Image (cartoon, rainbow, N blue to C red):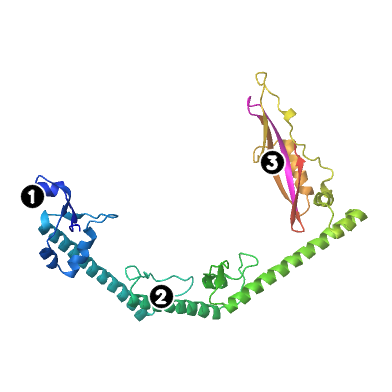
Amino acid sequence: METLQINTHLHAVTALSLGLTEHGKGHVAPTAAELLALTSEQRTELARYVTRATLCNYLELSAPGWAGVIEAIDAIIEKKRAEAEDRERCIERERESFRGLLTSGRYYEAGLPLREITAYGPNYSRDDPEAQRLWAAVEAARRAERARIILEADAALAYATDAESSGKPSPEIRRVLEAAQRWVGGGKGYAFDPIPARAVEFEARARAEDEAAKAQIADGTRRLERGLLTDYGTVDQVERYDAGVLPADEFVRVAKARLFAPLVDFATYARLDVSDVEHSDECYEGKVKFRSEEYTGPLSADQWARLQELRTAVPEGAAVELREHTAYCSSCDEIATRLGARVTIEWAGEKYAREYSVD
C-alpha cells in the first residue's frame, strides 16, 4: 500500500521570508495521529490535495511541514466561512428588497408610457427558495399593476384621430396600444396583454375611416381623370382607362395638353445639350455635366417681359419658378447657361409641370 501524501507548494518569496532555501512543489506525509486529530471539516478540505493519478491540486503553504498544512487548511476554511456569511448577508439584502417592494405595492410610475420603478431581480439569491418565492410574488404583483394601469387608461379613452397623421388614432390611444404590447416569443412576436378593448376598437375605427376617405378621394380622382379623357381624349383612351390598361405616360400627355392649353402660344424650354458647350482648344477629353437650380439673379428687359406675360397667362393657382440650367465641361471649365420658367399645376391630387423659355 502507498503512503498518504499531501500535495503542497511553497512559494519562493514565502521561503525567503522564512529563511528557507528550498521552495516549490513538494509532499507532506501526515502520521495517523495527525490525521485522527483533524476535524471532519478539515478532512473534507484536505481531501482536495491528496495525491491522485488524474488530478493534482497543490496546497499553497505559508510554512513548511504538517504545521503549514494545518495553517493553510484552516485559512481556507475561515475564508469560505467568511464568504458564506457575506453571501448570506447579500441574500438577505435581496430578500429584504423584495419584501420592501411588496410592502410598497408600487412597481410603475404613474401614467403612460409605462416607466418601471427600478427593481433588481435575484442575483446572490438565485438558488434561495425564500428569495425565489418573494421574487415570484413581486413579478405577479408587477404584472397585476401593469394590467391595472393599462386598463384604467383604456377605460378613460375617447375616440379621436391624430390631427398630424392621417389614418392614425390619437397619441393617447396609441400610448395605450404600445403599453399593452408584450413579447410572447414562440414565433408569435408581440401580443396584447392585457387586451385594451377600447384602444383596439378605436384603432380599427381610425383605420377604416382612413381607408374610406382614401377610397373616396381615389373615386373622385377617377371621375375627374375619366371626365378629362372623355372631353379631351379619344374613345379608345376612355375604354382603355376603364379597363385599367391605359399607360400612365399617355394619360399624362392628355392631362398636360388640357392643363397647359392657356400657354400654347408660349415657347417651351429647349434643354441644353453637350453641343451647347464650346470647349477650349486645349480640351480633349472633357466630359459635359449638367445641373439645374432655382434662379434669383438679374433679368434683361426681354426676359422680364416674357416672364410677366407667362405669369399673366397661367391658370389660377399655378406656380411659376425661374430655373437656371447649366452645362459645363469638367476639364476646361467652359459653360453654357439657359433660363427657363417652370409652371406647376396641381390637379386631381397630382402635380404636373412644364417648362417654358424666357430667353
Q: Is residue 330 magenta?
A: yes
Image disc number at residue 107: 2
CA gap, disc 3 and disc 2: 62 Å
Q: Secondary structure at mark 2?
A: loop
- Say which quadrant the N terminus sits in: bottom left
Q: Secondary structure at mark 1?
A: helix
- Rendered view: 258 above or below 295: below
**Residue at x 25% of width, y 56% of height:** 52
Q: Nearer the viewer, mark 2 or mark 1?
A: 1
Q: Could you tell whether 260 is left or right of 153 in the image?
A: right
Residue underneath mark 1: 18
**Residue at x 83% of width, y 48% of height:** 253
Q: Residues within 10 Å of mark 2 (few under 14, many from 20)?
A: many
Residue underneath mark 3: 323
Residue 165: tell me if it is visible.
Answer: yes
Q: Residues within 10 Å of mark 3 (few under 14, many from 20)?
A: some
Magenta-drawn segment: 329-345
Q: Position of residue 310 (x, y in %)?
A: 77, 45
Foreground residue among 112 and 51: 51
Q: Earlier in the sequence, mark 2 or mark 1?
A: 1
Amino acid under disc 2:
Tyr
- Rendered view: 212 above or below 151: above
Q: Position of residue 44 (x, y in %)?
A: 22, 66
- Say which quadrant the C terminus sits in: top right
Q: Could you tell whether 238 is left or right of 43 in the image?
A: right
Q: Position of residue 124 (x, y in %)?
A: 32, 68
Q: Earlier in the sequence, mark 3 or mark 1?
A: 1
Amino acid under disc 3:
Arg
